[in-house]
Image: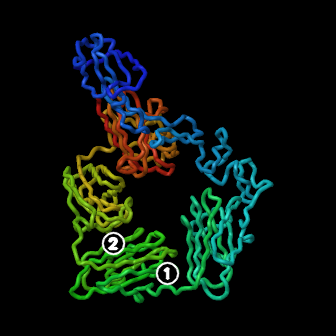
Amino acid sequence: MALGSALFHFALLGCGDPSPSQPDAFIVLVDAAPECEKDQDCDDRIGCTLERCIGGRCTVFPRDSECDDGVFCNGFERCDPERGCAPPEKRACDDGSPCTLDRCIEEQKRCEHMPRDIDEDGDPDGFCVGGSDCDDNNPLRSGRQPEICGDRIDNNCNGRIDETPCSRSMHDRCEDALRIDAPGTYLLSFGGSSQDHLFECVGSRVRDLFVVFTIPGEGPKDVSILARAERAATYLALLNTCTSPERECRSGYPARLRLRSLPPGEYVLAIGVAGVDDEVVLELDWGDATPAPPNETCTSAAVISVPMGGSYRGSFVGVQDDHAPPCGRASQGDLVYTFDIPPGESYNLFVTLSSPTSDPLRFSVLRGCDGELLRCAHGTPARGRVHRIGEGRYYLILEGPNEADYVLNVAFEPPSDPVSGDRCSSPISLEPATPYMGTLLGAEDDIEVSCAGSSAEIIHRFELTEPSDIELFAESSAPIGLALLRECPPSSASSEIMCRVANAPRIRAFSLPPGVYFPVVEGWRGGAYRLEFRRSAPRPIIEAMGNDDCSRAHPVGDRGGLFSGSTSSLSHNHNPTGCAVRSNAPDAVFAINLSRRSRVIASTHGSSFDTVLYVLDSLCTTELACNDDTASGTASEIDTVLNPGRYHLVVDGFAASDAGSYLLEVQIETMP
């Protein structure tokens, strides 16, 4: 029976451990409580309540424990005696202090409040009690840093620059370089070092030290240099003298530099570190000179036996960039292999190219040295298959960084056809509202999409005969990429309409003109997936302009709408607190006026940047709902129930640089 609305009286139960059927509290219906003779007369059909007939009147016991989803950080679920389990109230880990960085730790079921130390240099922000950091975005400036001589920076945050006393690290200048005359491992301390050398390979200065090493005079040597920090990127620059231009420059995690047949003599090494690390391990080694590999061009290509194939080892050290295959990378050295398929024979070619140090490599399979590209693959490792190659001469061009060794494995297999949908010439058709179950097993990487990198893909197609809004939804047990192309293969970046990566990526595109479109599913693990395509008549898109803050919020109608705009010309006025860090990105504001209790669904699918979406109250001060990324990628989505009143919906960016054009879809459904 329905108990109807009434005034409630709340009370807690007595002490002791509750039984599974025991409620968390009880509510007595004071006014209009139905009379009863037995418990069954009080059934309110709400699963989280326990109803009892006490003293001839119905008493309701809401049991919050029946609503608990076991997740700490998403808030505390309560049992509403009128409506059942209510959405969780957000658990606010924000303690309201700008001097703490707050986060929720699900594993430990607790909130953590750390002193505000953005640059992680161990010194909290100087505006906060206990902190002395005058620049919390720069780990080289704080009240705990020594003043460094001659860098024109207030390192110790005392308001003075380069004052006496100041310090300078040993070997901070090239004239005071550490001298090394034997291979070995050396620990370098960067405490007190300044920024003297401009590393040309990255175009920036970082804290640096200098080393001079000597190659003995008995002949050229192959030299290997590695600079490694615990948490930061390192830089290496090789010079002939302190004042000469760089011979070589590298950066990385770690930075590595390998040189073939370096003549005897002295060389200068500038070593840099980016970040808070004060120690860098330098490994310096040299040995007998080795000749450069001979197979740098098609005319000197190494021959692969057919159908034996084989495994080949080599190095890109000292290799020049002689070729420019269609999918090649400029400035990387290349090596060439070749093979001939005899008349009347046909094979599948399977190639794997890997690096012992996990460097990214790539290869191209060409029919003729400058002919048709049959396969391009890159990655760590790079691998790919070419189906049914017949009579002719083929070339395999390898590319990799100058420091990398490689292992090339080539196998010739019995011929077979590619799987369905593996190429743009044979896409799999999609029909609206008809799910397609597919697999990436056996697929190759034939095209590039922006969000999925080098991975195998299956290509689909659908045709629109009239302007339409469309939705694509994919599901897989592992993260997959979902892209929508205007043409296949894509001829330019504008060929791609949208690309998303997630376990369940979703693409929504509005007012697409008639034509043929190509959904592409990409995956790294080659598993099964489900793909569904839906279309609908286009909704009008309302352009929002000037909605820079709550006082100029763009109105949303009673039934919602589809809005477009750009945050690039707007300013930063609001910050999310519940689902993202304070980003300082520009934001756009919309106003929602509800005359009745309503369900509000808002999403930014189709936006050009990483969005954050949140709801503020009528005063634009209290956050009521917030979402950063959905399961379908960097778009945001909010689904919440709001009481009558005025609310503000804010489209924001995740980071300060996240700004640009956005699409905001708002749906409003009146609740009973």
Q: Position of residue 326 (x, y in %)?
A: 38, 75
Asked if disc 1 and disc 2 are in contact, CB closer than 8 Å, the reply is no
Q: Position of residue 511 (x, y in %)?
A: 28, 50
The residue type indicated by label 1 comes to Gln
Q: Within 10 angstroms of label 2, few (less than 14), some, or many (20 or more) residues?
A: many
Q: Quadrant of the C terminus?
A: top left
The residue type indicated by label 2 comes to Gly
**Above or below: residue 91 compared with residue 393:** above
Q: Residue at x 45, y 79 (%)?
A: 334
| Residue that numbered label 1 is attached to | 320
Q: How many badges with numbers are in the image?
A: 2
State left or right for residue 140 relative to residue 632.
Answer: right
Q: Within 10 angstroms of label 1, few (less than 14), some, or many (20 or more) residues?
A: some
Chain-order first, disc 1 or disc 2: 1
**CA–CA distance between discs 1 and 2?**
24 Å
- Label 1 or label 2, whichever lies nearer to me, is 2
Q: Position of residue 325 (x, y in %)?
A: 39, 77
**Would residue 546 be seen by someone viewing this image from the given angle?**
no
Question: In terms of secondary structure, where does tag 2 sit?
Answer: strand
Q: Quadrant of the N terminus?
A: top left
Q: Which mark is residue 384?
A: 2
Q: Residue at x 55, y 66 (%)?
A: 254
